[in-house]
Image (cartoon, rainbow, N blue to C red):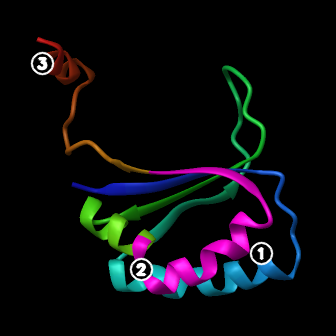
Amino acid sequence: MTAYAICHLRNVELGADIVDYIRRIDATLAPFSGHFLIHGATPEIVEGPWPGDLVMIAFPDMEAARGWYASPAYQEILPLRTRNSTSVTMLVDGVPEGYKATQVLAKLS
């Protein structure tokens, strides 16, 4: 099942460190078959506050997402972003093809 790395970025200081991070991140994704779905987009807000930008990266599964985040290559560049922005980052499983919202009710019983 596809898994996602999602980051809500705020207060990004677009300097040399962030530029370096952007130049290097694609190479860290390749070994884990990760690819951007959303990168730095400012969402059109229809409910509630949302300061900042959104990044979403897809991976084949949670194991690949965790492997990418923990990889030496990504950990090496991570401080370039965290020192120059405020963010919340998470890894989350997607849902299978054909998923219906009512399927969550089975988990509640």
Q: In this picture, is 17 found above or below 96?
A: below
Query: Which structural element holds mark 3?
Result: helix
Q: Quadrant of the N terminus?
A: bottom left
Callout 1 crowding tier (Cα within 10 Å): few <14, some 14–19, many ≥20? many
Residue 51 seen by the camera: yes
**Disc number at residue 71?**
2
Q: Quadrant of residue 105?
A: top left
Which one is in front in this view, the residue at disc 2 or the one at disc 3? 2
Q: Callout 3, which amino acid? A: Ala
Please provide percent x and percent y for residue 46.
68, 23
Q: In this picture, is 68 found above or below 13?
A: below
Marks 2 and 1 sit apart, C-alpha to C-alpha, by 19 Å
User: Any magenta on residue 63?
Assistant: no
Query: Which structural element holds mark 1?
Result: helix
- Choose the circle earlier in sequence order: 2 or 3: 2
Q: Which residue is mark 1?
A: 18
Toward the viewer: 107 or 99? 107
Query: Which structural element holds mark 2?
Result: loop
Q: Which residue is mark 3?
A: 106
Magenta range: 70-90
**Disc number at residue 105?**
none
Identify which residue is drawn at 74% across, 26% down. 49
Marks 2 and 3 sit apart, C-alpha to C-alpha, by 36 Å
Q: How many labels, in total?
A: 3
Callout 3 crowding tier (Cα within 10 Å): few <14, some 14–19, many ≥20? few
Q: Callout 1, which amino acid? A: Ile
